[in-house]
Image (cartoon, rainbow, N blue to C red):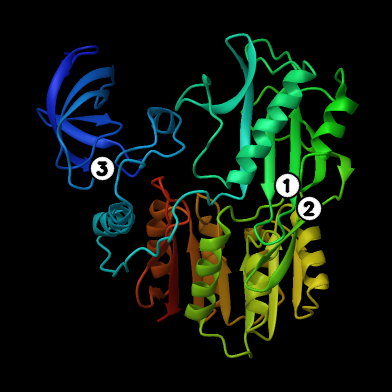
Amino acid sequence: MKTKQPVEKNKQYDVSIEDLTYQGLGVAKIENFPIFITNTLPGEKAKIVVTKVQKTYAFGRVLEVLQSSPDRVDGLGKEYTQTGIAPLQYLRYDAQLLFKQHQIENLLKKSHLNIHVDNTIGMDEPYGYRNKAQIPVRTVAEQLETGFFKRNSHDLVPIEDFRIQDTVIDDVIVKVRDILRANQVVPYEEVNHQGIIRNVMVRRGRKSGEIMVVLITNKEQFPNSDQVFNEIAAINNVVSVYQNINNRVTNVMMGDKNILKSGSPVIHDQLLGINFIISPSSFYQVNPVQTEKLYQLAIDKAGLTGNETVLDLYCGIGTISLAMAKHAKRVMGVEVVPEAIHDAKMNAQSNGIDNVEFVINKAEDQMKLWAENEIKTDLVVVDPPRKGLAGSVIESIGELQPKKVVYVSCNPATLVRDIGLFEEQGYEVDGSIIPVDQFPQTPHVESVTVLSLK
């Protein structure tokens, strides 16, 4: 017999908001049936309309906030919540920091782990922090527009001021948009896989001020292309212009082929006094102000004396490796992306750091090789993607038995899961988990955790 849900699509309800999900959605319950609602905060009462009903939960849209939370502030505008650019924009910043701390605490509690979580380290200026933008280009009302997709859709909302991005990057995107319009470049059309321009990527070195622009196109050749690239190269402080070809039917942003159209193959930036080169495919943290705090924390918590051998898994372009190398005897980094390892080696060379080695491999495969070669290590640093660590990586770390593991996490759920797996290998959390707010106005949180061999 089919169970009837206690709410119906398109019907209005008065609800009380009880909680906030890890995605920043308010949670209300009717007969214990959860409804997830954007732009609502715990403690608020709201009139909502139900927009979607699933078997075990529903989604709603707020029509009117009947009773506000003391943590509510004036937002930037509904387009920032619609697109997911700034879903926490209406939550006071100190309350955002508390929410991120509680996210980790709640996950630990669910896993019956009794570990202290420190206060979240925030920003003095929690806007304009992103040094990289990846902006879709589509036709809206018969005109080429740049902006961002509505959440869970591919409907473009035209936006000029992204608020969380470096304002210089916002200005460059508008100039690139106007160049594309003037040269009648046809935006990509997903339905029939036609058109030219899919996305615009802009990166800026915070310390150098150098700007890289990458046009991601569906085809290599297109009308007026030389004119387009020349005009982009003439934008103030643009030192590097690329074309990236992505002709696959995919949601993946970039293709495999980067063509340098003008200027330098890289731009430069600096973290913790170390100079870095950044190419189109480089992974480089998007919030340089908080990244310095994050990496300094990792170094401080590692307690290096200058005599240690450090393994850095997922080393990227060597940001953590090179920062650690100043305080260790030897650092060995591994990364699966060949271009990143090329950049890491160049970064080591240009900074005169000679106690680092970088290899191209999957982390789990390289760990096995290091174990077979009986590499003795004192410290392993991991900064994995959102999916966390593969079980085989944790087992390999267990075989090498370093005294400490420094875990830099961008996903509290996989961090908590991995802490449990490290415990099976004889490790325990040493001190507290320290959250760092890399992404203000969004629900995402990074953290630093040290695990010590029991």
Residue underneath mark 1: 281
Please name the residue shown 70% across and 71% down the image.
Answer: 274
> Are the residues flagged by discs 2 and 1 in contact, CB closer than 8 Å?
yes
Of 53 and 88, which appears nearest the observer?
A: 88
Q: Earlier in the sequence, mark 2 or mark 3?
A: 3
Label 1 residue SS: loop
Of 330 and 276, which appears nearest the observer?
A: 276
Please name the residue shown 66% across and 63% down the image.
Answer: 315
Residue underneath mark 2: 339
Q: Earlier in the sequence, mark 1 or mark 3?
A: 3
Of 114 and 305, which appears nearest the observer?
A: 305
Q: Residues within 10 Å of mark 1 (few under 14, many from 20)?
A: some
Please name the residue shown 37% across and 68% down the image.
Answer: 433
Residue underneath mark 3: 20
Residue 348 position within the rendered picture, expressed as x and y whole percent measured from the top left: 78, 71
Q: Amino acid at mark 1?
A: Ser
Q: Earlier in the sequence, mark 2 or mark 1?
A: 1
- Label ID, residue 103: none
> Are the residues flagged by discs 2 and 3 in contact, CB closer than 8 Å?
no
Q: In which quarter of the view is residue 100 placed?
A: bottom left
Residue 124 position within the rendered picture, expressed as x and y whole percent measured from the top left: 43, 61
